[in-house]
Image: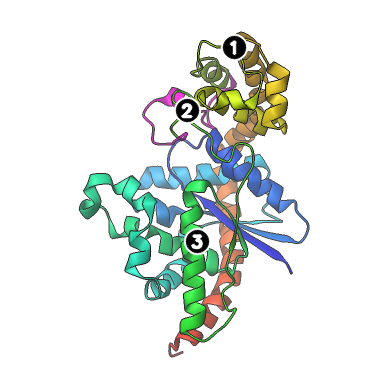
């Protein structure tokens, strides 16, 4: 059976190392697996659950697409498109809204984290975000979804919604129950200045993250300024338990090099950060430099990006519309 992978990245500012290692790099790896179809989206419908500047949103949409292409996602082998260009996402989301239950959404911890004390002032879209995410996946009958730990609960909801639809409309197996793809040594990249916080696009401190639009010089400077501690590099991974910033840098090194954390710790055991950080900076430049250069080249040619996204939207529509039509038939809509 063909494995069909779906995933996406929001077009919000400051695409960073965490997005690359936790998502985009994995997109390329999945694309290269035999028997795997990949559908990669720029999820702009999700982006507007919070206020956006329209011009910036358009620019950031191209930026995410440029990052996909620069990292090695091949538009002749994978589908790359913008979510809002395929209306089936929104149409299916409404149908699934009528299948999902309020109690399921109220248990979603990410809404509570994002809304905080202002839940009543948040948009309905922010609350309903997980149902749209389910529609994104199910409209292509995707079988696998690469997700971070913070999205795992949303994928469980997508599975619940798929199962409920299949039962409610007596169409056993119509929607597959998508499986998560979780893992990798840096699936969760942390803040360079606070190892207890996830690296974030929204953090006001630019030194907290490595942006994919940074220059090589800025990349090196941020690694050298990354927070550590007064102790030497650990001699065993167990020593990382109370050293979150050091653990984060070691995981980044492991992800970029393809080594295990244990191997990285063994290589630098007892060394000072004056030894480790330059090595990490060199590795980051070697790994990310070509991606950053290619991304800048794509961004200098927006017409090329737009053409790729238009073609991708046509391919995505060709895949999604028949599934949406089958869904409407199962529901009993007149046609």
Question: In the image, which disc is placed on residue 156?
Answer: 3
Which residue appears at 43% of the width and 47% of the height?
A: 58
Magenta stretch contains residue 163: no
SS class, disc 3: helix
Residue 180 in sight: yes
Disc 2/disc 3 C-alpha distance (Å):
27 Å
Q: Residues within 10 Å of mark 1 (few under 14, many from 20)?
A: some
Q: Earlier in the sequence, mark 2 or mark 3?
A: 3
Whether pointer 2 and pointer 3 mark residues with C-beta atoms closer than 8 Å, the reply is: no
Question: In the image, which disc is placed on residue 232?
Answer: 1
> Does residue 21 lie above or below 271 as drawn?
below
Disc 3/disc 1 C-alpha distance (Å):
41 Å
Disc 2/disc 1 C-alpha distance (Å):
17 Å
Disc nearest the viewer among 2 and 1:
1
Quadrant in the picture for residue 326: bottom right
Which residue appears at 69% of the width and 51% of the height?
A: 30
Which quadrant is the N terminus positioned in? bottom right
SS class, disc 1: loop
Q: Which residues are magenta?
A: 198-217
Q: Residues within 10 Å of mark 3 (few under 14, many from 20)?
A: some
Residue 86 in sight: no
Q: Position of residue 163 (x, y in %)?
A: 51, 74
């Amino acid at each position: 059976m063909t494995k069909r992978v779906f995933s996406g990245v929001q077009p919000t500012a400051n695409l960073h190392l965490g997005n690359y290692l936790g998502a985009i790099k994995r997109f390329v790896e999945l694309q290269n697996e035999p028997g795997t179809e990949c559908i990669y989206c720029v999820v702009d419908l999700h982006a507007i659950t919070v206020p956006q500047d329209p011009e910036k949103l358009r620019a950031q949409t191209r930026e995410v697409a440029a990052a996909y292409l620069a990292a090695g996602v091949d538009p002749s082998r994978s589908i790359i498109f913008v979510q809002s260009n395929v209306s089936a996402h929104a149409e299916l989301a409404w149908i699934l809204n009528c299948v999902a239950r309020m109690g399921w959404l109220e248990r979603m911890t990410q809404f509570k984290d994002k809304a905080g004390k202002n839940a009543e002032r948040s948009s309905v879209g922010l609350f309903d975000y997980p149902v749209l995410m389910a529609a994104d996946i199910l409209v292509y009958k995707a079988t696998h979804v690469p997700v971070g730990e913070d999205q795992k609960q949303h994928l469980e909801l997508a599975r619940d919604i798929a199962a409920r639809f299949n039962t409610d409309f007596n169409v056993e197996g119509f929607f597959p129950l998508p499986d998560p793809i979780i893992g990798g040594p840096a699936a969760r990249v942390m803040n360079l200045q606070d190892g207890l916080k996830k690296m974030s696009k929204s953090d006001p401190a630019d030194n907290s993250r490595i942006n994919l639009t940074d220059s090589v010089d800025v990349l090196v400077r941020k690694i050298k300024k990354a927070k550590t501690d007064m102790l030497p590099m650990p001699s065993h991974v167990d020593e990382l338990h109370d050293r979150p910033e050091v653990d984060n840098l070691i995981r980044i090194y492991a992800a970029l090099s393809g080594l295990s954390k244990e191997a990285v710790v063994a290589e630098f055991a007892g060394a000072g950060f004056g030894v480790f950080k330059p090595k990490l900076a060199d590795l980051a430049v070697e790994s990310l430099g070509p991606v950053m250069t290619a991304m800048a080249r794509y961004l200098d040619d927006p017409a090329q990006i737009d053409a790729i996204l238009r073609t991708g939207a046509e391919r995505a529509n060709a895949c999604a519309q028949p599934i949406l039509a089958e869904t409407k038939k199962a529901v009993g809509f007149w046609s």
